[in-house]
Each structure stands twice: as C-alpha cells, then as structure tokens.
Amino acid sequence: MATKPAIVIAGVTKRYRRVAQSHKFLTLKSAFVGGNLFKLLNPAEVFTALDGVDLEIRRGETFGLIGANGAGKSTLMKLVAATTKPTEGTVTVNGKISALIELGAGFHPEISGRENVYINGIMLGLSREEIEARFDDIVAFAELEEFIDTPVKNYSSGMYMRLGFSVAIHVDPDILVIDEVLAVGDEAFVHKCLDKIGEFKRRGKTILLVTHGLETVRRLCDRAAWVDRGKIRAVGDPMRVTDRYLNWVGEQEESELTRVERQRVASAGEASGEDAHIDITDEAPKNEEGEEAPYEPGRWGNQAVRIEGVRFLDEQGDAGHVFATGDAMTIEVRWSAPTEVNDFVFGLGLFNANGVSCYGTNTDLERFKGESLNGEGKALIHLPSLDLVGGTYYLDVAVHSRDGRPYDYHRGLYSFRVHSRYGDVGVARLGHTWDFSGGVRWKQLGGIESERDPELTRGDGA
C-alpha cells in the first residue's frame, strides 16, 4: 500500500441538474426504466461540474488545487471525500481520509459542540474511547473551552471552522483534505492551522488543499493543479501552475476592463463612427447646489480640440489594462484639432477606486508653452516604473486652455489594474530597503525575491 498513490481520479465526470423542477418522468422508477436520467435530460437542463478529469496525487505530497469560483474544485474535493459520487469514472483513495470541505458540514445546529465532536469523530472512523482520549486536545486546539457545551447554531463561522478543523486533524488521517474554509478564520488561528499542516507534511501525510491564496500554494505545496470549467488545465510545479493561472486571470480582467471602458466611453459621447451623434456639455456636470458633481465618469468641453482615444501601452508597445507593480507604462492620447489652436495644455489625473487623487500633472505645470496645435497627433506620457500598490486606477485626461477652459475633458473613462504580490497599503509603493542592528533574527518565508513583481508574467508560463 505504501507504493500506491494516495488518490487516483480516473475519467471522472460529475453532472448536476440545473433546476429541481418536475420533469417528464412521473416516478423515479420510470426514469431508470427509460434509461440514464442525465442522458434523457436536455443539455440545457444539465450542468457539468467536472468533465473527464484524470489526476493522481502521490502518497506523502502536499497538493494544491487552484482556480476561479465555480471551476469545479469543491466538487472534486467532495468526490475524494466520498460525500458525493461521480456520474462517470472512478475515485480511488488509499488510506484513512479526513476532510474539512464545507463550513459546518456534519454539524447538527441544535446540539452542543461536545455532542458534535463525538458524532463527527465517529463519522470519521474513531471509536468512542478514541474520541474521549482526544477530546481535551480537540477542544483546546479549537480554543472553545468556554463554548463547547453551547449549541453550535450560536457559533460564529470562525468557531465552526475551528471546531471542524480540530476534529479533522485529531483523527490523525493518512490523507487530509481541506477546502477554502480556512479563509473565515482569524489571522492567529489560520497561522496555527498552517503550522499543523506543516507538521502533517513533515510526518509524510498526504494533504489536498483548495485555496485562493496562491502564495500559500507556492509555499506549502509540492505540486498543484489548475481547474477551469470542470477540466484540469495545468498540473505540476506550483510556481509554474500559479503563473499560468495568473496569466489567464490577467486575460479575463483585460477583457472585462476593455468591455467596461467601451461602455463608459460610449455613454460619455465618444464617437464610434462617422455618423455617431455626440452630445457633450461644455462644462463639468453640476449637482443641485451648483457645485461640480462627485467623481463620476463623464465628458465635457467645447471640442475645439478633441481627444479621440486613450491607450495604456506596455514596454513592447502593446495595449492593455493589466500591469504589475514596477512595470513600465506609456499613456497614449490621440488628439485632433479641426482648426489651429494656439493656447492649449495637456493634462492627466490618476485616481484610485475610492476616487482619491493619486497623482496629477499637465504640460503647463511642467513648463511647456503651447504655440500651435492643428490636425491630429498623439501625446505620449512615459512612466518608467509604475510604483503603485495593487488595485484599480482611473485616469482623467484633458486638453484645455491655460486658464482652465476645457476643450475636451474625459473623467474616469479609462481604467487599468495593477497586480502586486506585496501587501502595501496606501497609493504608491516607494522604493526602499530594510536595515537592522542588534539582536534581530528573521525567518525567511519566501515569495518575494526582488523589487520587480513577477506575479503577472506574460507568455505561456507552463
């Protein structure tokens, strides 16, 4: 048995009915006499959560599952834990398994934590004597001594997680299966859980972990798999798998940001063709008190000079909306002026998702005096290093006279997203180093190896 894989998933497909409405079958017997229930349903009535999945998890390894919500990760975990069965294929588990795959799963809300410990322990294969021997340790690890005789319906989500995790690990399984439930725990208890997972890892236990914490996967897991729409898209080294997943996330965000930007620009009156009607006010929108309205997307100006389009360019000159902390960016502003203008200023402002001004400048502040603007052209603003904390940012871009009269002002029509593996807060990520003296010792946790942020790599990454 020691040479067998811990878990073998072979050709597994799992389908669910989308709705629980009445069907053409009057009885369950008629469904099975008529043939396979899922085959007789229309394709629109069936949701395929997993589609032909093959996966082998080696004995003694820590294996991570990553992917977007609804990708099929939790369904896969439930199949491994045998709380549901595959529609097709087989799942083979070699060893004693303990699973924490759903918050409060197996707990009866009306009875106490004490009684639930005994019920869960028996469900996981322990005898009553074994539960009694481990009971104090279970309660102490969960830090629920004061509440163990309280009905669990009065527990918070964090208390549920504590008790469930504590029972699962004190069963001392060969295979530990953990879903994203750790996300509801407080910081101190999550660290405690991760330490316990590390102990299991040192003891040669098999661990199957589902998490959105990619840094946790990189740090803890020997291998990882990316699940996407019921299929395995990549399996292997955690760094390479998470990088490939992040490439895909960037592509999805790029598509979404592009779509939203087009809607904002169109609703603000941007011409989308020769016959497009443009209805643009001369001044910024006002509220009922006659003051300029709060930060909302919009466009105004007398159109003596027009901003025809804005793009965010990377180092290769490719347009995009997703960047990483430290990346170079060029903001390209295409303009046109049907008649010559001799008094003009180009300006930009950068705002975070809360509408807080992060940075602003214009050509007048930087001592450029406009003399002539005619025809069409581009203004390029080069940012050699995008030293911003992670988040979504909105751009104001404008052409106006030196006294502030707007020719064309675009407020918040364009946005980009910055990814960062750093936990900085605020707006800017200032260049810095750390230096210490005296009796200081640090433990390197890994993850950040340079000031450049590699979290959003471009290319295959596999």
Image: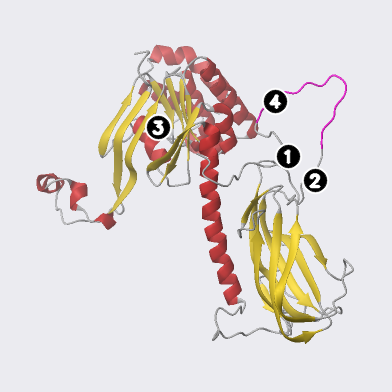
What span is colored magenta in the figure? 433-446
Amino acid type of the residue that numbered disc 2 sits on in the rendered structure: Leu
**Mark 4 to mark 1: distance in Å?**
16 Å
Corner quadrant of residue 116: top left
230 shown above or below 175: below
**Mark 4 to mark 2: distance in Å?**
22 Å
Label disc, if present, on residue 451 of the rendered structure: 1
380 shown above or below 23: below
Corner quadrant of residue 126: top left
Label 1 secondary element: loop
Q: Nearer the viewer, mark 3 or mark 1?
A: 1
Amino acid type of the residue that numbered disc 3 sits on in the rendered structure: Gly
Query: Which residue is identified by label 3?
Result: 106
Position of residue 68 measured from the top left corner of the image (x, y, whole percent): 48, 46
Query: Does 39 lie within the magenta span?
Result: no
Considering the whole magenta stretch, tell me its main secondary structure: loop
Query: Which residue is identified by label 4?
Result: 444
Q: Are marks 3 and 4 in contact (CB under 8 Å)?
A: no
Which badge, 4 or 1, comes first in the chain's sequence? 4
Between residue 459 and residue 84, name the one nearer to us. Answer: 459
Amino acid type of the residue that numbered disc 1 sits on in the rendered structure: Glu
Q: Nearer the viewer, mark 3 or mark 4?
A: 4
Corner quadrant of residue 233: top left
Mark 1 closeness class: few <14, some 14–19, many ≥20 residues within 10 Å = few
Which badge, 3 or 2, comes first in the chain's sequence? 3
**Mark 3 to mark 4: distance in Å?**
38 Å
Mark 4 closeness class: few <14, some 14–19, many ≥20 residues within 10 Å = few
Which badge, 4 or 2, comes first in the chain's sequence? 2
Position of residue 384 measured from the top left corner of the image (x, y, whole percent): 75, 53
Q: Nearer the viewer, mark 1 or mark 2?
A: 1
Label disc, if present, on residue 430 of the rendered structure: 2
